[in-house]
Amino acid sequence: MTIVFNTAMHHIFLGFNPEYIGRSPFIPAAQHSLNIKARDLGLKINPGSYVHILPIEAGFVGADNVGVLIAEEPYNQDEMVLIIDIGTNGELLLGNRERICSTSCATGPAFEGAQIKFGMRAAPGAIEKVKIDPETKEPLYKVIGKADWHTHLEKVNAKGICGSGIIDAVAEMFKAGIIDKSGKFNMDLETPRVRRGTDGKPEYVIAWAEETSIGTDITITQADVRALQLAKGALYAGAKLMMKKMGVEKLDRVVLAGAFGSYIDKESALTLGMFPDCEIDKVYAVGNAAGDGARMALLNRDKRREADEKARFVEFMEIAVEPEFEKEFMMAMHIPHMKDKFPNLKKLLEEKQVPVMVKG
């Protein structure tokens, strides 16, 4: 058996005290790979078999990221690639065969639907995709468990909105002029969809109460937009600081890893500014890359040796202590960014005749 997980899970599983990976300088109790008999871990498989645990990169970058590393193999490529494993912690890898840097960003749970007013996990009834007409400001949405996009002719029993739906919704609200690049609502629009909620704060109605199974309107609130801005700002700031450290001007490819990454619309992600500008055709999802790396290590002893070697080759960057972090984070809160240029995004939006101001 091979196992990959974050550093907290790693320590708890092995019986190590995880307290110290939460304290500076965030040193894990064990960093190299481990081979332990299944019987010693109490696992109910062949008691004589070994459990192989992939190595840890750093205090906040665990064996799961090493799984991503050996699955995607940026160390064997000439292109400058950014790999983003999105979760409550966003783990980033940037580099090529010359040099690889990694970091961890505390994105919070907004991408997973938590801390969002009508947020929920990706289960039947969750709105997973959203489109908004820039002229009428009317939405179309797709609900998990329903084959087609919602039309106003049917009741779709929406329960809430999951992470991919939230990313779509906020990106579409920006493209439709419902929010500006600072994330602030435009309250001068002539549509019943944009209103003030019972708390007096702005919100956008995705689904009216009669379309839902919860008996109330499903909305995206100003607080929801802010939560997403905080999450995506952390990811962007992490990527930007690594690029600065490595002297990288532009990305050749962006890889979205993790099960959640497979469901994110890459155009919406680029529009929000979840990562620096890149050709849209060079942005793609690879699914559960950590699991792929674990399977490779299970079946190939050379991959296990490779994991140990390359985990030490990667340079970890603790962005929270970087002097420029706060400045970069603040600028990355804007959609897509306060100052950075997005020529590929600008070209994409111009081709679709979306009248949004994006620096090229």
Image (cartoon, helix red, strand yellow):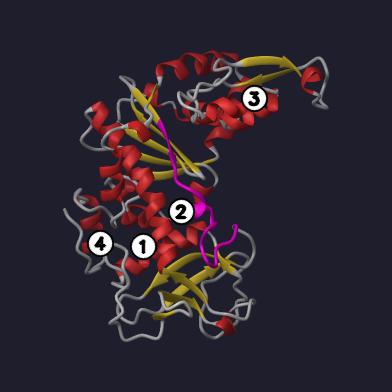
Tell me how far mark 2 sits from mark 3, CA to CA. Answer: 35 Å
Reading the chain from its start, which is encountered first: label 4 or label 3?
Answer: 3
In this rendering, which labeled residue sits more in front, label 4 or label 3? 3
Along the line of sight, which residue is nearer the eye, 279 or 106? 106
Residue at image mark 4: 349
Mark 2 lies on a secondary structure that is loop
Task: Relative to 122, say whether 298 is above or below.
Answer: above
Indicate the quadrant where residue 127 lies.
bottom right
Residue at image mark 3: 17
Reading the chain from its start, which is encountered first: label 1 or label 2?
Answer: 1
**Residue found 26% across the figure and 27% down from its top:** 246
Mark 3 lies on a secondary structure that is loop
Residue 21, given in percent of the width and then of the height, sits at 54, 27
Tell me how far mark 4 sits from mark 3, CA to CA. Answer: 50 Å
Residue at image mark 1: 171
Indicate the quadrant where residue 322 lies.
top left
Reading the chain from its start, which is encountered first: label 1 or label 3?
Answer: 3
Left-right relation of 229 to 115: left
Label pair 4/3, CB-CB below 8 angstroms: no
Mark 2 crowd level (few <14, some 14–19, many ≥20, 10 Å Cα)? many
Mark 4 lies on a secondary structure that is helix
Three-letter code for the amino acid on which mark 3 is drawn = Asn
Residue at image mark 2: 264
Residue 3 visible to the viewer: no
Range covered by the magenta-colored residues: 103-121
**Residue found 34% across the figure and 56% down from its top:** 272
Three-letter code for the amino acid on which mark 2 is drawn = Ile
Left-right relation of 181 to 305: left
